[in-house]
């Protein structure tokens, strides 16, 4: 019986894999966007209601501009690959919140928040494009669905195999993964997910017309801000080491630069 269960579980996992179209990384996806996005949008609304939203300032306008260009890059890439339908249901939104935390995040479905505390580290639009590309990369790569799926498998594995998982169980898992706190939404992605988002974000910023060769400088500033190797900042709680991150980014730079040179936004 145990062998049968493991076999069925293996079949379920294989049948429920999603692939990041940018990097090719495969991930578990038991929850669909249609199931995930409503809860994501609800949590985002809670954060905006409880936080201090900044509008009309130069920083807020910069976030809108960078975000809109990254949105364009995502849509254009998916269009070129013939997979635009994978972005169905996305409701892109880019919001600046007044808060000291050095953080930014993107909920599944394109809901982005930037904390003002990160702006001295990003310094300019290019630095902002690095971090927003990275966070949008998490959403596009399906890392939220992967985390929720892992949580549900751990808690309700047998019920999933029997097709008995309820909406409340999905909602509970989503609530655990997207933990709304005083510091915002803490997502705790794995290091593999972080590296996946790094490369996805690198390509997105390049396609949006931001120089990808500046990405390593941003991550070095973030590391210095967080205390270097100690990585005390919440943003770095599950991030890969500086050396690993920078090495992977440098490996991907030739492809990123090709996207950058072809971008209609280059130099704008």
Image (tube, rainbow, N blue to C red):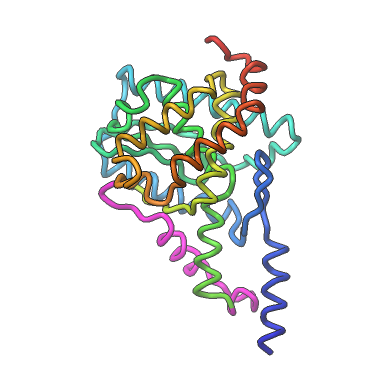
Q: Residue at x 65, y 41 (%)?
A: 23
Q: Give, as a single range, the part of the protein colored magenta.
A: 158-183
Looking at the image, residue 170 lies above or below residue 124: below
Camera-side residue of 112 and 247: 247
Please, which residue is most extreme toward the right here?
82
Number of numbered discs visible in the structure rendering = 0
**Image position, residue 122 (x, y; %):** 37, 26
Please, which residue is most extreme toward the top here?
267
Q: Residue at x 67, y 21 (%)?
A: 258
**Image position, residue 1 (x, y; %):** 69, 90
**Image position, residue 213 (x, y; %):** 53, 23
Residue 137 sits in quarter = top right
Q: Residue at x 53, y 49 (%)?
A: 193
Looking at the image, residue 41 lies above or below residue 73: below
Looking at the image, residue 54 lies above or below residue 106: above
Q: Is residue 238 magenta?
A: no
Camera-side residue of 170 and 149: 149
Give left or right: position of 55 versus 161: left
**Image position, residue 241 (x, y; %):** 44, 45
Q: Residue at x 70, y 71 (%)?
A: 10
């Amino acid at each position: 019986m145990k062998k049968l269960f493991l076999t069925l579980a293996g079949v379920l996992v294989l049948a429920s894999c999603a692939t990041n179209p940018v990097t090719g990384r495969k991930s578990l996806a038991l929850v669909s966007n249609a199931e995930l996005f409503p809860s994501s949008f609800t949590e985002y609304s809670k954060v905006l209601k409880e936080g201090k939203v900044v509008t009309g300032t130069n920083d807020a306008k910069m976030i809108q501009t960078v975000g809109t260009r990254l949105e364009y890059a995502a849509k254009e890439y998916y269009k070129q690959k013939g997979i635009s339908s994978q972005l169905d249901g996305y409701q892109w939104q880019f919001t600046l919140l007044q808060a000291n935390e050095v953080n930014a995040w993107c909920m599944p479905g394109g809901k982005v928040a930037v904390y003002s505390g990160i702006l001295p580290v990003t310094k300019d639009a290019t630095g902002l494009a690095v971090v927003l590309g990275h966070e949008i990369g998490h959403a596009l790569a399906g890392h939220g669905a992967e985390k929720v799926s892992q949580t549900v498998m751990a808690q309700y594995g047998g019920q999933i195999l029997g097709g008995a998982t309820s909406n409340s169980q999905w909602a509970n898992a989503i609530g655990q993964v997207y933990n709304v706190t005083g510091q915002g939404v803490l997502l705790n992605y794995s290091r593999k997910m972080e590296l996946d988002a790094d490369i996805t974000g690198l390509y997105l910023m390049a396609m949006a017309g931001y120089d990808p060769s500046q990405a390593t400088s941003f991550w070095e500033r973030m590391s210095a801000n967080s205390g270097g190797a100690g990585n005390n900042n919440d943003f770095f709680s599950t991030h890969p080491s500086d050396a690993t991150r920078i090495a992977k980014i440098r490996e991907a730079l030739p492809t990123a630069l090709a996207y950058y040179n072809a971008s209609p936004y280059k130099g704008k």
